[in-house]
Amino acid sequence: MLTLRETIDAATGVSIRSIGASGVDTGHHYFTAMSWMSDSRHILVCTDIDGDKMGVYVKADTTDGSGEIIVDRLEWGRGLVSDGDRFYYYAGSDIYELDLVSGRSRTVCSLNREAVVYGPLSITKDGSTMGIYWRTSGGIWAIGTVDVETGRVREVATPGFAEPYPIANHAMINPEDRNLLFFAHEGQTESIPDRIYMADVWSGEFRCGFGQKRMETGELGEYVGHEMWAPDGRHLYFVKYPHSPLKPTGIYRVDARNGEAEFVNGDYRYWHVAVSPDGRWAVADTTEEEEISKIVLIDLASRSSRLLCEIPMWKQHPGHPHPSFSPDSRKISFTLADEERKLRVGIIDIAE
């Protein structure tokens, strides 16, 4: 049974509403995947999460705490909510669609049965195209798209990164341009000099989208990751992690058209960053020495920051805060740990 709690951050005075269940872990989606329905009132959470990260997906009302089970057993982090209030999620080689209003469901596509889909998923604003990635039976990592209406899967790129870091992942379709796909070269950030890639869906050509600088010694000087498209599709936001030797560190963005990168804000030790649907704000969590994190709001016009709260968290998934916005850009949701180290989903209304 989900319950609501109201707390006040001692340092900032910000009000936090949280939703969760006693004695079990509850989390929201990965920060690049929308958790909220279009009414900015109902949110999808994964609760009763076990040691294998399997849980129950619930459509929760953030006003009264009531909930409706959507999927009764699915791993945390496997879904997203589209602008059309459809929940997309994957299991094995299949991707499914569930209409959160009518309750109708269908299979969007099925890859080769020996292929395994990974997340997070992504989707264009118009709901027509998904960005996905999968691993083939031969151990090859593939980046591609899915036509949501027809279920057609298009393999866009198989980069073939060399060992020890062969993984290509985090395929994210540009929300406004279904011909542009971001993907990441995954691995230990200190050893990856080419993390960010941009791919042309129709030609299959891809290029490194951000040239990470090296130090005079030849060692890598910029450690980057946790990318997310801005909702207008013009910029890809990412974090240069605080332990990068070359400064400044913090939130950056790269222009999808000309590849120009710019520094946004470095006031805190940023970890993940998400942009509001209206493009006015960014929200980020931070990495600290202890199992706490700060939630920080950044005004993208002035580039100034505001500390919202400091929360307990876990160092491992699904306990990262992963802050993100509701569709109306008013609410920020994030995962936090309560006094018993159980996870809940916190909500801050920045319009209050």
Image (cartoon, rainbow, N blue to C red):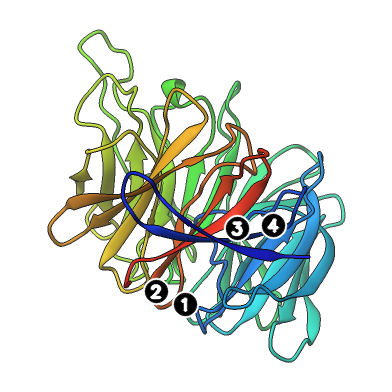
Residue at numbered disc 4: 78
- Relative to 138, residue 302 above or below: below
- The residue positioned farthest toward the top in the image shown: 217
Residue at numbered disc 1: 125
N-terminal label among 2 and 3 = 3
Give residue 234's position: percent from left, percent from top: 29, 65
Residue 228's label in the rendered image is none
Residue at numbered disc 2: 176
The amino acid type found where label 3 is placed reads His
- Distance from disc 2 to disc 3, alpha carbons, whole Å, reads 21 Å
Q: Label 2: few (<14), some or many (≥20) within 10 Å? A: some
**Helix, strand, or loop for circle 1?**
loop
- Distance from disc 3 to disc 1, alpha carbons, whole Å, reads 17 Å
The C terminus - image quarter: bottom left
**Residue at image point 49% right, 43% down:** 184
N-terminal label among 1 and 2 = 1
Labelled pair 1, 2 in contact (Cβ < 8 Å): yes
